[in-house]
Image (tube, rainbow, N blue to C red):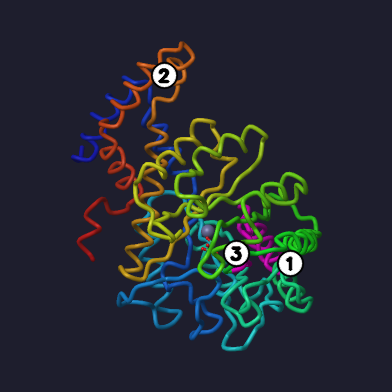
Amino acid sequence: MSNVEKNYEIAKEMYAKIGVDTDKVLKTMKETPISIHCWQIDDLTGFENPNAVLSGGIQATGNAPGKPKNKQEYIENLNKALDLIPGAKKLALHAVYLENNGKKIERDEILPEHFKGWVDYAKDKKIGLDFNPTYFSHPLAEDGFTLSSKDEHVRKFWIEHGKRCRDIGEYFGKELGQKCITNHWIPDGYKDNTIDKMAPRLRLIDSLDQIFEKKMDWNHNTDSVESKLFGIGSESYVTGSHEFYTNYVTEKKNCILCMDVGHFHPTETVSSKISSYLAFGQELMLHVSRPVRWDSDHVVILDDETKALMAEIVRYDALDKVNIGTDFFDASINRIAATAIGGRNAKKALMLGLLEPTKELIKVEAEDNLTKRLALYEETKSMPFGLVWDMFCEMENVPKSDWINTF
Ligand code: RNT
Ligand code: ZN
């Protein structure tokens, strides 16, 4: 028996005493995919245009060396990052990661064939794929408006992009036998006080209706719409706000809501919102990220909100209702490590959620023993979670904490 196994046996016994079956936890961890975003590896540059400049009110700040210089280096780095994240995974792509073989292919011309290489990659790695239309970093997004633009030409262009992205998502789902979430996030908004907040919203409703018009099997492709509170250059008004999309999904039932934890007011938490959507049977997409002051996209750490988020999903047995993905970009540290740190932390938070003595906590709460509820919850925090995590890494052939020595 290895030390890791011996330690695991001790932890298993301790968790069993509070009613938690760690073997079951390990099984769930192995089977529950977290969708790892592809864009931390290269600061969201993609393959469409190697000189692409990121726009849309998002920024990958920092100057760490090691940004991949070509596609081959990109793939090598991505592989290294994915190999450091244990358990089931999906890879979330953005439309600008297409394979164009050196030809200019406009966003309103992209086809499934431009992503065949990614399907082969996913099959080889036995992972699923998620997708994101890229409604930014493009001349037709330069004035800050895409799907809610008052310029019909601009709006048509992006509607066509959205439609084509759904087709690509459907192609992923069919090919891989695992559904693709195609997540639509647009940067649209104004820097300063906005008088007519309504007109762009009405145009956005119409654009989304057109994009989602074609019916698809949700088991192949499910679309999500991601809200935001503000971005750089859209500080005062964002067309696709949380309330806007909450109402859109409820009314139209043609897509699901995506909540990015960095897209809310500083004291507002996504973890506290989840149960309200689940109460109405709504499926959700999450972008696990970390807000810091005005920025929504720091590397995920094992903080209280990330833990609370995962605990909430587990408490309502909603792992099949809530799709979990990561979203951050930090160019000030090694990009492979950043992807690995964020991915591992999302998984660690999930494991902590699964190790919670939920049954017992619910029981004492129902008995109005609120003292015991708090006492048990707090005592659980010093349980040997790390020993179960190490076992998981060992089972999955992924390095334990020693991976940090390579950086
Ligand atoms: C931006 C949104 C969005 C993007 C990705 C790259 O604020 O969070 O999800 O980060 O599409
Ligand atoms: Zn996001």
Question: Which of disc 2 and disc 1 is earlier in sequence?
Answer: 1
Residue 171 is left or right of residue 267, and the answer is right
Query: In the image, residue 303 lies at what x, y percent?
Result: 35, 45
Q: What residue type is labelled 1?
A: Lys
Q: Distance between the residues labelled 1 and 3?
A: 11 Å
Q: Which residue is located at x 80 percent, y 55 percent? A: 215
Q: Which mark is residue 207?
A: none
Q: What residue type is labelled 2?
A: Glu
Classify mark 3 as within 8 Å of ligand 1 or not, answering yes or no: yes
| Element marked by disc 1 | helix
Task: Evaluate if marks 1 and 3 touch, with contact meaning CB atoms under 8 Å apart.
Answer: no
Question: Quick check: 144 left or right of 251?
Answer: left
Which residue is at 21% across, 34% downward? 6
Is ligand 2 closer than 8 angstroms to the Cβ of mark 2?
no
Residue 290, image quadrant: bottom left
Residue corresponding to mark 3 = 132
| Mark nearer the N terminus (1 vs 3) | 3
- What residue does disc 1 label? 163
Residue 360 numbered mark, or none: 2
Q: Which residues make up the magenta segment?
A: 164-190
Instruction: Find out whether the residues at labels 1 and 2 contact each other: C-beta distance under 8 Å.
Output: no
Are the residues at dot 3 and dot 2 in contact (C-beta closer than 8 Å)? no
> Dot 3 surroundings within 10 Å: few (below 14), some, or many (20 or more)?
many
Q: Nearer the viewer, residue 110 or 24?
A: 110
Q: Is residue 182 magenta?
A: yes
Q: State the CA–CA distance, disc 1 to disc 2.
A: 47 Å
**Helix, strand or loop for disc 3:** strand
Q: Is residue 95 above or below residue 357?
A: below
